[in-house]
Image: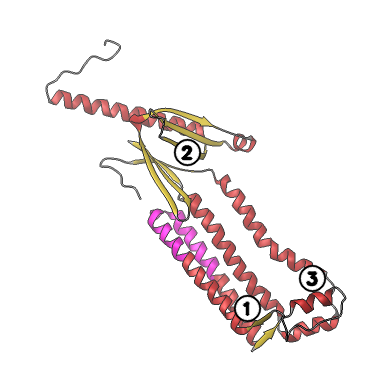
Amino acid sequence: MNVCINFYTFLYYNYGMEGIDFIEGNGVILSAKILWAIFFVAVFLYIIISSIFVFHWNRYGGGERKIKLMQGIYFAVSGFLVLLALGSLFAFLYS
Amino acid sequence: MFKLEEDEKIKHSIRRHSFVMFKPANVAFLMVLAPLVLYGLYQAIPIPEDFSERIAMEGQIGFLMVFFYSLWLLFVLAYIFIEWTTYYLDVWHITNKRIIDVEQIGIFHRDTKSLRFERIQDITVEVKGIIATFLNFGDVHVQTAGATREIIIYQVRKPYKLKKMITVAIDESSERFYKEHSKRMRESGIPNPPASDGT
């Protein structure tokens, strides 16, 4: 499924000018593939940064309670955000 | 990483005042808020009815916005935790023998150095600015006899108390050193030299 959102047309409409359809031309086209690519790149970066955090917290944190607590908060919040992104992407593309 | 010597114990671990997290917290707050403000502005712009309908037909734009906002928040979260990790792992340990400075400058930059008590010659405290004065934090400079080595304990809470703590630790260390030295001398049969005041 291809979803086209044309921000140029958008701007022209908002400024009361005649709408020019750029969808077929040089408009911004967000296809499902691009959205999935954005999602997977973000998740890949998230995994890398999380690995760096875990490495630092475990190696230099010395197993402190506060480090463990913050680690829990980080994974709870970030996990929620990843799931939210995934859910909204599914909803956008397939609902 | 640092290794403690035999019979060395950490007496205090000191971190910077949590006020140093104020700036990153504000930046993160603005980062969280910025897309919402932009969205609010976008909502304030009147859109022709037919165009709104067209957007609704092209896909539920709200879901797309939630998608991008979630990824943005993930980025903001990473930023917050980079700042926090740098803050929390930047620590000074005062042991019964030395001061160990573990400096976490960035997420990939870590520097560890130590200063033995017998080398310390001077400790000075610097409290700069109105906020530091009211919140009672400042820098503690620990200097050695040589001009090159100095440990600066940055933006630490209650700097005068810390200075006192270090001074007490130094005194205890010298006392312990003197006792051990005297014991060794006694064991080897050499009498202790008289103290400097002649007693």
Q: Secondary structure at mark 2?
A: strand
Q: Amino acid at mark 3?
A: Gln
Q: Secondary structure at mark 1?
A: helix
Q: Write down the quadrant of residue A57 in the picture.
A: bottom left
Q: Is residue A6 magenta?
A: no
Q: Amino acid at mark 1?
A: Ser
Disc 2: which residue = B153
Q: Is residue A93 above or below residue B135?
A: below
Q: Amino acid at mark 2?
A: Ile
Distance of label 2 from label 3 (alpha carbons): 49 Å
Magenta segment's dominant SS is helix
Disc 1: which residue = A88
Image position of B124 (left or right of B127) = left
Q: Chain of mark 3?
A: B
- Residue B43's tag is 3
Image position of B176 (left or right of A54) = left
**Earlier along the polypeptide chain: callout 2 or callout 3?**
3
Q: What residue range appears in magenta?
A: A50-79
Q: Position of residue A2 (x, y in %)?
A: 65, 87
